[in-house]
């Protein structure tokens, strides 16, 4: 068993919490850390932009990473959400065991 992480911004903390609850209920993630007040500077469709968003860091079991990302993309309120996921190179054994309970 090993861990994976997913980072994704949301327009509001309420949206992030709603989506996190859904992913938790569906057994695709074991935890979501919500980080309100994330200042995002970006280029979108050739134009510079800036927004204050709520970032979410989701923790899951590595074998669920692709499914969790696909589901997050399907239910995210943004038309084109920025979702990045990766497998953790190192995980504490207790964390890996906890996230392993998802599968």
Image (spheres, grey):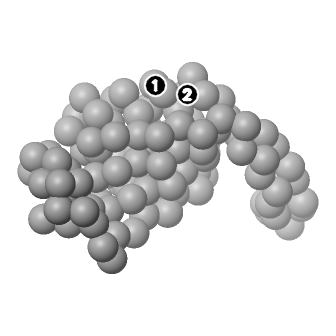
Q: Position of residue 44 (x, y in %)?
A: 78, 60
> On screen, 54 above or below 48?
above
Give the residue at x 86% y 66%: 46
- Which sits in the foreground, 27 or 79? 27
Local SS, label 2? helix
Alpha-carbon span between mark 2 and mark 1: 5 Å
Q: Which mark is residue 15?
A: 2
Quarter containing the N terminus:
bottom left
Q: Which of the numbered marks, if any, corresponds to residue 18?
A: 1
Circle 1 Cα neighbour tier, 10 Å, few/some/many (<14 / 14–19 / ≥20): few
Tag 2 near tag 1, CB within 8 Å: yes
- Residue drawn at x 44%, y 32% is 19
Residue 62 in the image: state x and y as whole percent: 24, 64
Q: Is residue 57 visible?
A: yes
**Residue that sits furthest to the right in the current view:** 48
Residue 43 position (above or below residue 56): below
Q: Residue at x 52, y 44 (%)?
A: 56
Residue 25 lies in quadrant: top left
**On the image, which quarter does residue 89 sit in?**
bottom left
* Residue 60 falls left or right of residue 15: left
Q: Residues within 10 Å of mark 2 (few under 14, many from 20)?
A: some
Q: Looking at the image, can residue 64 be seen?
A: no
Question: Please, is residue 58 above or below residue 61 in the view?
Answer: above
């Amino acid at each position: 068993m090993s861990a994976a992480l997913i980072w994704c911004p949301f327009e509001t903390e309420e949206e992030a919490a709603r989506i996190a609850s859904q992913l938790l209920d569906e057994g695709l993630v074991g935890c979501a850390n919500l980080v309100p007040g994330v200042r995002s500077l970006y280029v979108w469709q050739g134009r510079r932009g800036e927004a204050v968003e709520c970032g979410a860091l989701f923790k899951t079991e590595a074998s669920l990473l692709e499914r969790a990302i696909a589901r997050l993309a399907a239910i995210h309120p943004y038309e084109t959400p920025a979702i990045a996921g990766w497998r953790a190179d190192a995980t504490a054994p207790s964390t890996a065991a906890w996230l392993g309970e998802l599968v």
